[in-house]
Amino acid sequence: MTLEKAKDDKVIVNVLFFIFLTDWEEQPNNSYDIIRRLTGRICRRRALYLSLLSENIVHEDPQESERPAISPRKMAGIFEILCGVAAIVSLLYYYMTSSFDFWKVRGVKGPKPSLLFGNIKDIIFQRKPLTQYLIEIYNEYKNEPFIGIFFRSTPILVMKDPQLIKDVLIKDFSLFPQRGTPVTEKAEPLSQHLVFLEAARWRPLRNKLSPAFTSGKLKEMFHLILECADHLEKYLNKIPENDIVEFRELTAKFSTDVIGNCAFGIEMNALSDEESEFRKMGREVFRTSLKKTIRFRIRESFPRVYNQLGFLFDDGGVTKFFVNIIKETIDYRKKNNIVRHDFVNILMELKDNPDKLGDEIEFTDSLLASQAFVFFAAGFETSSTTMSHALYELAQHQDMQDKLRKEIREEFKRNDGTLKYESIKTMPYLHAVFQETLRKYPAGPLLFRECLAPSYTFEGTKVTIPKNQKLLIPIVALHHDPEIYPNPDNFDPERFITMEKIDETNYMPFGRGPRNCIGERFAVYQTKVGLITFLRNHRVDVCEQTEIPYVVDPASFLLAPKGGIHLKITKVSET
């Protein structure tokens, strides 16, 4: 199709749309003249068109006149329907493509979008994980400070320049204080948590919850983490020699017990009880399914509609479970006068003194449960994922595993066979393994931010974005940039020991700025204690079920392995 013909066809479609929306039956000559004038073509069958419009058919071919005549009114009706269909198709096409020049007019380079899908067709059809796509375009537009992409028809600005990322997350945080994720509290009561909340409700809530995660509080809870570590050690000792274990599930059970014990004062028994309700809920939260995918797409594309109708999608009992468990825990503590300086205790104080949160927040049981839910879900998933990824790499690098085990055992000897709170900070190789794991497998592979300023121009550029524009910071791509981390696909803990200080914007496993992960300290200690427990007296090794190379599950939003992480575990005697 030539460009001229394409333009002519587009003109004809638009004219048909115009005729359909006007009283063309009363002005057939005008409609015909418009077509003739705009297209520059003389319709050879003008008489046919005019007679149709006036309900009189003129037959040019004598043979055609012998055929059964079609009702003039029916012909006019068919023509009207065709015009209507053309109009609707034109409107839909315009709606779905009208934003596709958004980045071009702003001078931002990016891949060409496609109809219906934008730039994420492979992600939508689960042919490619989002993390892989971000790494690919990051490398393709190597010298650009931004990349303009489209999530279907929505323009998204992918940030690359470290200084501009720092401006968004720190310097100009007041203009980018929220993630832009819709809070659909009618449909999903548990969506009112710190990760999703808009700035007005996030600020006072974050300030009140922060005391639960100070280093002092963590030190008070350390003995509770060690109790869970003892349970894990007993569990490991019962595993038959050379048995194959799925470590994603095992580390998730350990993390579930730690969070339940430390944050809620509840024995979750995920390690000892295969039917633990808390572990079931943990699986349900992160279980992928077609139903959840559809639900997510509707929520992101039509948040207002979803907020009214989202209740039609069952969440597997997650909301009911967390609302009830927090309510019952608080009621039990009040009735029995129990005081524990943990996360639930802070929630109790907020419930008793809602005025401390200011006028912006309406304090409800679901708001309370939302904070418990996100701490539980984010806490066990990120820590368990990091542990299993570290063990996956160490199973392939036995020399690194031996070096770490030696450091762990030496620390225990220095402390008469015990692990102290201060010990966690005195094991440099453990810290290097932890950092390298989160570099290669960041628990939060990307960040979203939303512009709240009327408009914003990035410093040193001519690129201006409007209010409500969404930004995407591809942490996983930054962590795999070969100019920052040579041989990024190699697992090399030594890089964090030998290399000079890393720019914090190039290493953000817990985010950065005022809206970073509130539970970072807790996650660090929980993960390191878990690794110490796994490796002190046991060795992990690859087996026939171990997926090498690592394959990311395209259905997962996080960096999760397709098929899990299967490793062989054996007991190692202390020499």
Image (cartoon, rainbow, N blue to C red):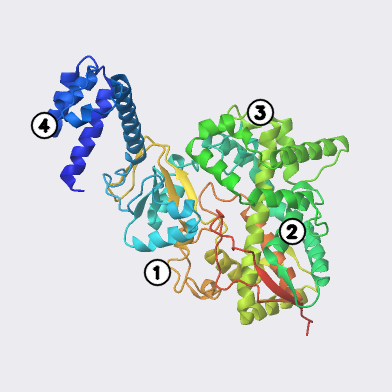
Q: Quadrant of residue 431?
A: bottom right
Q: Amino acid at mark 2?
A: Lys
Q: Which residue is mark 3?
A: 355
Residue of label 1:
483
Residue 443 image point, x, y percent: 57, 58
Q: Position of residue 345 (x, y in %)?
A: 75, 41
Give whichever of discs 2 and 1 has the lower sequence position: 2
The CA span between labels 2 and 1 is 38 Å
- Left/right of residue 17 with respect to residue 360 in the rendered view: left
Q: Nearer the viewer, residue 217 or 239?
A: 239
In the figure, residue 234 lies in which quadrant? bottom right
CA distance separating discs 2 and 4: 77 Å
Q: Which mark is residue 113?
A: none
Q: Amino acid at mark 4?
A: Ile
Measure how far apart labels 1 and 3 are at the Cα level: 50 Å
Rendered residue at 20%/34% (across/down)? 11
Which callout, 1 or 4, points at the residue further toward the start of the chain?
4
**Tag in front: 2 or 3:** 2
Q: Earlier in the sequence, mark 2 or mark 4?
A: 4
On the image, numbered disc 4 is attached to which residue?
42
The residue identified by callout 2 is 253
Give percent across and percent down for residue 226.
78, 62
* Type of amino acid at the residue the image marks with label 1: Glu
Q: Residues within 10 Å of mark 2 (few under 14, many from 20)?
A: many
Quarter of the image that includes the C terminus: bottom right
* Amino acid on which the number 3 mark rests in the picture: Asp
- N-term-proximal mark, 2 vs 3: 2
87 versus 528 height, above or below: above
The image shows residue 427, relative to residue 465, as above or below, that is below
> 218 or 389: nearer the eye?
389
